[in-house]
Amino acid sequence: MTSSNDTQIFTTHSSLETTAWAEDFARSLASPATIALIGDLGAGKTVIAKGFGRGLGVKEDIISPTFNYVLEYQGRVPMFHADLYRIEDANTFRAMGLDEYFDRDGVFIIEWAERVRDLLPANTIWIELSASEQESERQIRVTRGAP
Ligand SMILES: Nc1ncnc2c1ncn2[C@@H]1O[C@H](COP(=O)(O)OP(=O)(O)OP(=O)(O)O)[C@@H](O)[C@H]1O
Ligand SMILES: [Mg+2]
């Protein structure tokens, strides 16, 4: 891990390692929290959400909420998992009432969160995933507050 100020960078070499990383990260997370997941298609955002589910003690499988926009789970705290790939902008997000999750007690995990950047709470934890030349390597950059 390397770090500067409030940014930390981790490298993983498989989806299992990413899941384990996210599981560990989620275990020490206090509710309420908003997690903004950003990264290209296939970067590993859903893999991270699955790890969060485990770390928060959710017993069910976390599945991609692409067609539901948001799915709710119960672990040691509630977990809400949203995928905004099909949401154009903040107005649509609000019109669908998804901003109400910011006021709920729980961990709100948002894939493609950059689409609603202006609506996110100031203490949002940003997790940015990027691929590297090695197929199964990912860089995970964690920033607390605006990146
Ligand atoms: N180190 C790694 N960490 C996470 N995923 C990895 C890693 N190496 C390979 N993968 C693979 O990358 C893919 C990540 O898929 P995932 O659905 O999590 O991406 P996503 O960012 O949610 O994409 P989308 O934008 O389509 O929702 C999986 O097939 C996973 O097995
Ligand atoms: Mg996904």
Image (cartoon, rainbow, N blue to C red):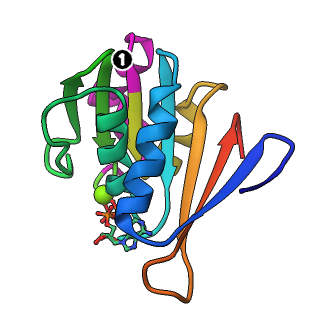
Q: Is residue 83 visible?
A: no
Q: Is residue 129 magenta?
A: no
Q: Is residue 142 visible?
A: yes
Which of these two is toward me, 99 or 22?
22
- Helix, strand or loop status at disc 1: helix
Q: Position of residue 62 (x, y in %)?
A: 20, 43
Which of these two is toward me, 91 or 85?
85
Q: State whether residue 119 is above or below residue 139.
A: above
Which of these two is toward me, 22 or 114?
22
Name the residue at the bottom extreme: 133
- Name the residue type under label 1: Glu
Residue 136 image-quadrant placement = bottom left
Q: Quarter of the picture for ligand 2?
A: bottom left
Q: Position of residue 125 (x, y in %)?
A: 59, 36
Horizontal side of residue 134 vs 17, given as left or right: right
Residue at image position (56%, 81%) is 132
Residue at image position (37%, 52%) is 19
Name the residue at the right extreme: 5
Q: Mark 1 — residue? A: 100
Q: Position of residue 76 (x, y in %)?
A: 31, 16
| Disc 1: CA contacts within 10 A as few (<14), some (14-19) or many (>=20) | few
Horizontal side of residue 146 vs 5, given as left or right: left
Please state the extent of the stretch shown in magenta in the rendering. 87-107
Horizontal side of residue 51 vs 126, given as left or right: left
Q: State whether residue 40 is above or below residue 65.
A: below
